[in-house]
Image (tube, rainbow, N blue to C red):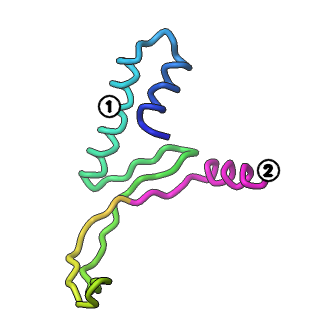
Amino acid sequence: MLRSELIDTLHEENPHLTRKDMERLVAVVLESIMQTLEAGARVELRGFGAFSVRKRDPRVGRNPRTGETVHVPAKHVPFFRTGKELRLRIDNSSKN
């Protein structure tokens, strides 16, 4: 699902609000999640999942084209872990 599709779906379910209101709502929610992760904190949406930041240590990688070794510096990456309800719904939908 694309961001625009999410906005359209929300607008269809809430016709009393304008599309512009839905765009602002989605933007505020996503921006809040990004700011929280940027601060190193965790975002948990019960039933859906949790976003967190994980640290990756520096390592020695390999350029697949040349085979040359490359130093990959340490970095922080976003991580998403699904909630129990989402996992169950996905599992049950794949059985149908």
Work out which residue is located at the far front of the displayed protein and give it. Answer: 65
Q: Residue at x 36, y 25 (%)?
A: 23
Is residue 11 inside the magenta stretch?
Answer: no
- The overriding secondary structure of the stretch rendered in magenta is helix
Left or right, residue 35 beside residue 45: left
Left or right, residue 26 beside residue 55: right
Amino acid at circle 1: Val
Instruction: Please report whichever mark, 1 or 2, sits nearer to the chain's N-terminal start.
Output: 1
**Regarding mark 1 in the picture, which secondary structure is present there?**
helix
- 21 or 3, nearer to the observer: 3
Q: Residue at x 30, y 45 (%)?
A: 34
Left or right, residue 74 beside residue 95: left
* Pointer 1 residue: 28
- 62 or 41, nearer to the observer: 62
| Residue 69 pos. (x, y %) | 23, 90
Amino acid at circle 2: Asn
Front tag of 1 and 2:
2
* Pointer 2 residue: 96
Q: Is residue 89 above or below residue 17?
A: below
Label 1 to label 2, Cα distance in Å? Answer: 36 Å
Q: Label 2 crowding class (10 Å Cα cut-off): few <14, some 14-19, many 20+?
A: few
Q: Is residue 95 above or below residue 32?
A: below
| Residue 22 pos. (x, y %) | 40, 22
Q: Label 1 crowding class (10 Å Cα cut-off): few <14, some 14-19, many 20+?
A: few
Q: Is residue 41 above or below residue 33?
A: below
User: Would you say the residues marked 1 and 2 are in contact, meaning their CB atoms lie under 8 Å apart?
Assistant: no
Q: Which residues are magenta?
A: 79-96
The image quadrant of residue 32 is top left
| Residue 65 pos. (x, y %) | 29, 83
Count all numbered tags in the image, as a single digit: 2
